[in-house]
Amino acid sequence: MINLIYLTTLLPLLGFLINGLFGRKIKNEKVIGLIGSATIGISFLIVLGAFIQTLGLPVEERSNTVNLFSWLNVGGLQIKFAYLVDQLSLTMSLIINGVGFLIHVYSIGYMHGDNGFWRFFSYLNLFIFAMMNLVLGDNFVVLFLGWEGVGLCSYLLIGFWYDRKFEKGTTSQAAKKAFVVNRIGDFGFLLGMFLIFMTFDSLNFKEVFARAASFPVAESTFGLIALFLFIGATGKSAQIPLFVWLPDAMAGPTPVSALIHAATMVTAGVYMVSRASIIFVSAPAIMTVVAVVGLLTALMAASIGLVQNDIKKVLAYSTVSQLGYMFLAAGVGAFSASIFHVMTHAFFKALLFLGAGSVIHGMHDEQNIQKYGGLKKYMPKTFLTFFIATLAISGVPGLSGFFSKDEILWSAYANGGFVFWLIGAITAMLTAFYMFRLVSLTFYGKERFDHHNVHPHESPALMTVPLMILAVLSIIGGYIGLPKVFFGEHGNLFEGWLEPIYAPAMNKLALYGDHTHLEEILLMTVSVAAALSAIFFALHVYRKNPQIAENVSNKFKGFYNLLLNKYFVDEVYEAAVVQPIQNGSEKFLWKIFDVKFIDGMVNGVASLVEKSSGVIRKIQTGVAQSYALIMVAGIALVLLWLILSL
Amino acid sequence: MFCVGVAGVLIRRNAIVVFMCIELMLNSANLTLVTFSSYLGNSIGQVFVFFVMTVAAAEAAVGLAIIIAIFRNKKTVNIDEINIFKW
């Protein structure tokens, strides 16, 4: 099955071509949905086969390269189009195809009756194609191909309902914002790639990482490469300072938010950092930057999430916050913990988004949670699954989120320090609080919607079955990474599975000081207790005494507004970056440089030719005899010259 | 004789006359060829004259046809009025 891995990109590409080229003619939603989902389903089976096959191999043979063709061959630069099938890429592929398949099936129900049904599925397939290239590529160039491809699909899908309004603008503006912000990050990533090629004379993962471990390269060079790569990651994975696009990306259809902006694409940055772990650990300063940025992003996004009123906005900030966690883990050297969180987060966040989609679907496109309330009895299945996901993300023991979050917090404490742990734990508390605020406002309490116009109803089975599968995964997904403190070295299967990938990086990194088991258990208890108290507090406030929330928000009006307006980051960027560029472009580049200089030059050449030809054209009289006369005179002159020169 | 032809081409306004002057130039060239041929005892010049005469005959036919065509269009053979080369 490993050799068939190319089918996992070929099939989605095929699905994209069929639906994209003929979807308009096929019209039948069942056929289009079947093509779109089946390609991903088959890909999933292939990845699963490759996974089982790899599991059967001895540990040192688990990293296989599948060569497809030679792509670029320019001088010293030789790029093969090849896929690297190893533990890390298989893990990512399983997540992408597994969750992706469920979301495809869900979309058949969710997008039912939409004019762009075929367009939606062709974009989704294109996205899976790009994402698979991103994680399977065996060199930075194939990774970059996927990297740009997912950016494009993200743009296309955010602006999918291009004729709809979104907040103050249109969905196309949100799409553009996402694209431009991503491009800034991509530029950093590209610079990082150039530097890697200059330093290591190769872009192939295996060669680069082997040379990174052995070449005598200055730490500053490593630092620069790692910094550029990390800038790329902040763009794709929505970290400070480039996180602003993700909340706006909620303009897209909800399955898109679940697939691209929660489960897969935004984790590309985490994947890349973890793939290039050896480069990052060689630059300790940048590792600290990664951890701090992750931590700050997690805290900031969680605090914004506390007060948002759009159900998808809350989830979007929650995603940003959870991504911050992943970078925190990567920054303190716990790469496998960060990938573990990628996986569990993919399960429960996809479930949350799909559940939110189900609610929005049942509430006739209403997204304001202040206008929900008491939906529990109308949508029992959605409620149950959503509740499970909420428990998982809040870090309630026994569900997947607990295991990954706890591992991250423990690594933050062991390798980063107490402050890292503290802020992480506070963030976990905030997470639990805003998630239960969301649940309470949506499913409990008084029914605040207009009973005459809105008739809440449960979604069809096509949508609820994927929800249930994801709910099961959200519960059991964590049990492959049990904490070592309780279950010994063999409890954490996940870390053992990924260990060979990070072995070179771990050799460079001095890790885990002397910490007793007691400390770990103590910290775990404290963070769980904090999360639980936050949960009860949220339930208490929003189910029973809504006026408390109002009182608090009135008391801290300034802070509340700061949070409600997302720390005014958008406005600051608008004033500091967008406006100067726009003004500079309009006032100088357009009105002066373009009009006066560029246009002047072009028009000047044209008028010069026109004027000079106006003079010259007088020579052409059109009378053949005058031409003949000039000819004779010419011949006479030539003859004269010949005779004289003899 | 050649100069007479040249002068005719340059000065006269009637296309037919200009045309005849071109023939005059061709024949002057022929005459020169034949003269030098017999003077140098080399027959190649005479052979060449036949070629010139053949080409001249063809050229006369084509040229006259053009003049007739122009006359039909413009109702004139005065080359001062035939200035369609002009921009």
Image (tube, coloured by chain):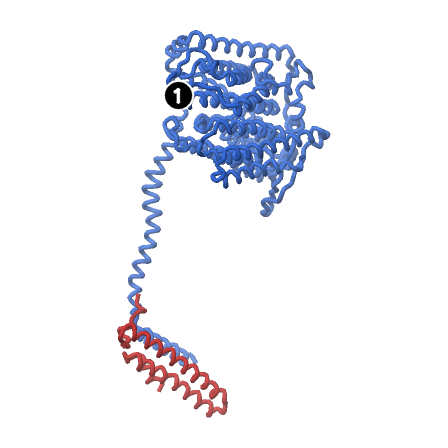
Chain colours: A blue, B red
Q: Position of residue A531 (x, y in %)?
A: 53, 12
Quadrant containing the N terminus of chain A is top right
Pointer 1 chain: A
Q: Is residue A95 left or right of residue A539?
A: right
Q: Nearer the viewer, residue A29 or A43?
A: A29
The residue that appears at 59% across and 18% down in the rendered structure is A475
Residue A245 can be seen in this image: no
Q: Is residue A368 left or right of residue A136?
A: left
Residue A228 versus residue A471 in the image, above or below:
below
Residue B73 vertical placement versus A444 (above, below)? below
Q: Does residue A421 sit above or below B80 in this rendering?
A: above
From the image, tell me which residue sits under label 1: A565
Circle 1: is it few (<14), some (14-19), or many (20+) Cα within 10 Å? some
Q: Residue at x 40, y 83 (%)?
A: B57
Which residue is at a point 62% across and 11% down the rendered structure image? A521
Q: Position of residue A583 (x, y in %)?
A: 34, 35
Q: Position of residue B18 (x, y in %)?
A: 32, 80
> What amino acid type is highlighted by mark number 1?
Asn
Q: Determine the image quadrant of residue A481.
A: top right
